[in-house]
Amino acid sequence: MNDVKTKYGINNKVVRASEKTEDGRVVNTKAYNCWKNMMNRCYNEKLGIKHRSRVCDEWKVFENFKKWYDEHYYEGAELDKDWNGYHCHYYSPETCVFMPRELNLYLKDKCVSERDYTFKNGKYIAQCYMGGRQRYLGRYADLQDCIEAVITARRSYALGVADRLRIDGEYLGKTLISEEAYNAVVRHKWA
């Protein structure tokens, strides 16, 4: 077998990891770059990232990841492991989904219950980022009420974005959000 062990996984050369461009240059495929970036995020100490994330054994072989990639990828989507379980630390077919960039970036914010809530004049201040801006949501005497306000606002915002991407995609005849990604947003636990 032609197994080539990369620093973090195995590219068994059964599937192509590179392709020729129109001008004759050889470049990595999108699938291979996605796999390589996932592996680097989890295992490359030089990146300075102290990651707890890991990759399932099946996906440590590029051929296996590529098969899943080909069945799920759509243009403009990013691989994400957090929508099917908040701050999940495991890349696998069961935990990952391709998510539009706009929603993927939105989830990179801290878990709602892990935030530092400002307490001023006897009340907690509820605020969160939506659409790239910090939004003020109100003041609450009870911390749990403050957290619920943030959860409600974040969930509502994400569902609104997902709905807009779904409608715009139908209008344009393109996939701007897959059914799988849309369902992950609907099911997502924000706490």
Image (cartoon, grey):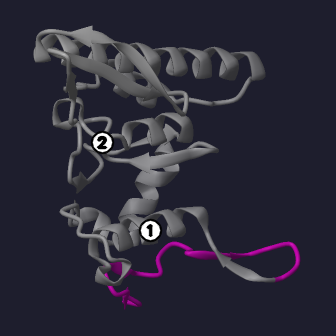
Question: Which of the image's four quarters has the C terminus?
Answer: top left
The residue at the far front in this view is 121
List x then y, in percent, for residue 183: 38, 22
Instruction: Give me the residue at 21% from left, 29% from top.
Output: 117
Question: In which quadrant of the rendered image does the N terminus lie?
Answer: bottom left
The boundaries of the magenta stretch are 1-24
Give the side of residue 63 with respect to residue 122, left or right: right
- Residue at 21% over, 22% down: 120
x then y, percent, for residue 146 = 21, 15
Left or right of 121? Residue 18 is right
Q: Residue furthest right?
A: 23
Tell me how far mark 1 sits from mark 2, CA to CA.
16 Å
Image quarter of residue 129: top left
Determine whether 165 is above or below 78 in the image: above
Is 68 placed left or right of 74 in the picture? left
Residue 105, position as x, y percentages in the image: 47, 42
> As displayed, is residue 91 above or below residue 95?
below
Indicate which disc, 1 or 2, sits on the residue closer to the N terminus.
1
Mark 1 surroundings within 10 Å by alpha-carbon count, few (fewer than 14), some (14 through 19), many (20 or more): some
Under tag 2, what secondary structure?
Answer: loop
Query: Amino acid type of disc 1?
Result: Asn
Count of number-bearing discs:
2
- Tag 2 residue: 82
What's the amino acid at mark 2?
Asp
* Vertical side of 96 occupied by 20: above or below: below
